[in-house]
Amino acid sequence: MTTPHFIINEISPGDLVFDVGANRGNMAQEFVHAGARVICIEPQPNLAAGIRHRFANNPHVTTVEKGLGAIRGRSNMSISSEADILSTFAEHWKVGRFKHMVWDQQIEVPITTLDDLISEFGTPRYCKIDVEGFERDVVKGLSSKIGTISFEYTSEYIEHSMEVVEMLIRLGYRHFNVTVGDGPELQWAEWVPYYEIVRVLMLSTSPDLWGDIYAR
């Protein structure tokens, strides 16, 4: 995932960003360059340790070594040593386009919620959610509208993405946009209502379609 230019342009020094599924902190680095305070949420212990090391001298970056979900607790995470960026809490994720990956580890990790993060750190200007099929559970842990939110979609689970859109509408989000693949450009110059997102993504015939949905 590449951060769209509009996100970086809208972040002002001191703004708070939640990087949910921070992996190695590459996107967090972009937010830091924009002057943001960044909360990196990464449940994989080795990756969380790497983020802490990467930003050891930066007091504006905090690493939370937990997963996010609908409620606090603990959950099993499937790890792919071959591609740790694809590690997931979602069992269905392992039978989609990545069904040939080897999930060779299982770890139990603590789970917190977006609401809990907001109580601890404040309301983010931007929240990036990249959690490999677990987006619905993450958004279920949010009870009020915050800043701009993005989450990943894939064609084989597009119905799940539409459920997330419905959740965001109930929270008060009205304007949407998308990126395709790993590209940094939004598909529409003007943000569109939810039904345009539904129309375009649900009617797509591409089996490999993926990208990110943005809401604000």
Image (tube, rainbow, N blue to C red):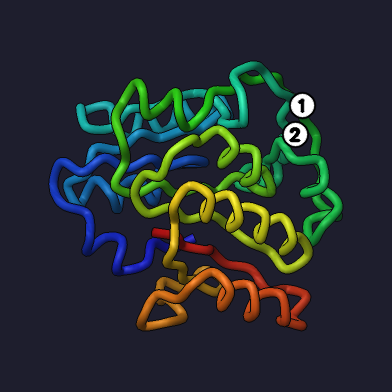
Q: Residue, x 79% and y 61% (percent of image)?
A: 97
Do we see residue 52 in this rendering? no
**Residue behind mark 1:** 106
Do we see residue 39 in this rendering? yes
Q: Camera-side residue: 53 or 44?
A: 44
- At label 2, counting other C-alpha atoms closer than 10 Å, the crowd grade (few under 14, some 14-19, many 20 or more) is many
Which circle's residue, 1 or 2, is located before the other in the chain? 2
**Residue behind mark 2:** 78
Q: Residue, x 65% and y 45% (percent of image)?
A: 136
Measured from the top left, where is residue 56 in percent x and y? 27, 27
Q: Camera-side residue: 21 or 47?
A: 21
Q: Residue, x 77% and y 83% (percent of image)?
A: 205
Residue 31 in the figure: left or right of residue 131:
left
Q: Camera-side residue: 21 or 80?
A: 21
State the SS at label 2.
strand
Q: Is residue 103 above or below residue 53?
A: below
Residue closest to the far left: 13
The residue type indicated by label 2 comes to Ser
CB atoms of marks 1 and 2 within 8 Å: yes
Label annotation for residue 118: none
Q: Is residue 25 above or below residue 187?
A: above
State the SS at label 1.
strand
What is the distance, in whole Å, between disc 1 and disc 2 at their CAs? 5 Å
Q: Residue, x 64% and y 38% (percent of image)?
A: 137
